[in-house]
Amino acid sequence: MESTQILAIRHGETDWNAETRIQGHIDIELNAHGRWQVEQVALALKDETIDCVYASDLSRAMATAHAIARQHGLTVNSLEALRERHLGHFQGKTWQDIESQHPHEAWQWKQRLPEWIPEGGGENLLMLADRIDTCLSAIAVRHIGQRIVCVTHGGVLDIMYRLATRQSLQSPRTWGLRNTAVNRLLWTPEGLQLVGWADERHLSDARDETGA
């Protein structure tokens, strides 16, 4: 059967990640700990065969992808379609801000209501899932028989996991989305399959030089 191996990786940590501040489409760079994480995942993948690297066009994902691509002499293909979910006026706020200032909307978000759209140009979960499913299929058909890397964001990876395991958009999340963890998927014309998830050995086995 025709298939494409996908290594799906979340970008390294940013200061906003550490503050639980919502990034969405806002372009925030990696912090020192994030740059360390990126070097660890790049080293962890250096001996694997990788045929192509894709990334969200936001700088935190691009920086992560470039570190991986350099180990293989590859360039990075930038795709806006791999961006995080657009969260409208929630972007730039912390969880605490949202719960105190917008309690009803915060409840809708926590309930994972598929049709709920954040005000200010946001996407609902149905829109996000359709965007990611369409994007991954378009990428995968170009690389049948190959292994590719897709560097993206936590909300996107959550959707990938749900697509691969056939879980609903409202199912409680029980899987990890840690920065730079390696997630393995297999794409076929029938859809995504889960191969392995949240491999963090490169983070636990290495010494964090930043002290973070």
Image: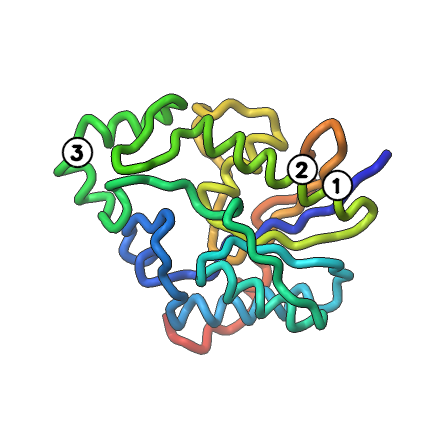
Q: Residues within 10 Å of mark 2 (few under 14, many from 20)?
A: some
Q: Is residue 118 left or right of residue 11?
A: left
Residue for point 61% across, 55% down: 54
Please give the residue where the numbered disc 1 appears in the rendered image. Answer: 141
Tell me the CA gap for discs 3 and 2: 36 Å
Type of the residue with mark 1: Val
Look at discs 3 and 2 and give the one toward the viewer: 2
Q: Quadrant of the C terminus?
A: bottom left
Look at discs 3 and 1 and give the one toward the viewer: 1
Q: Residues within 10 Å of mark 1 (few under 14, many from 20)?
A: some
Q: Quadrant of residue 102?
A: top left
Please give the residue where the numbered disc 2 appears in the rendered image. Answer: 137
Residue for point 29% across, 51% down: 20
Circle 1 SS class:
helix
Front position in the image: 133 or 45: 133
Q: Residues within 10 Å of mark 3 (few under 14, many from 20)?
A: few
Q: Which mark is residue 102?
A: 3
Looking at the image, is 159 positioned above or below residue 42?
above
Circle 3 SS class:
loop
Looking at the image, is 106 positioned above or below residue 145?
above
Q: Residue 104: x and y, percent?
A: 19, 26
Residue for point 34% across, 51% down: 23
Q: Residue 132: x and y, percent?
A: 55, 37
Task: Give the mark nearer the N terminus: 3 vs 1.
Answer: 3
| Viewer can see residue 199 | no
Q: Is residue 61 left or right of residue 77?
A: left
Dot 1 and dot 2 residues touching (CB under 8 Å): yes
Circle 2 SS class:
helix
Q: Is residue 55 left or right of residue 194?
A: left
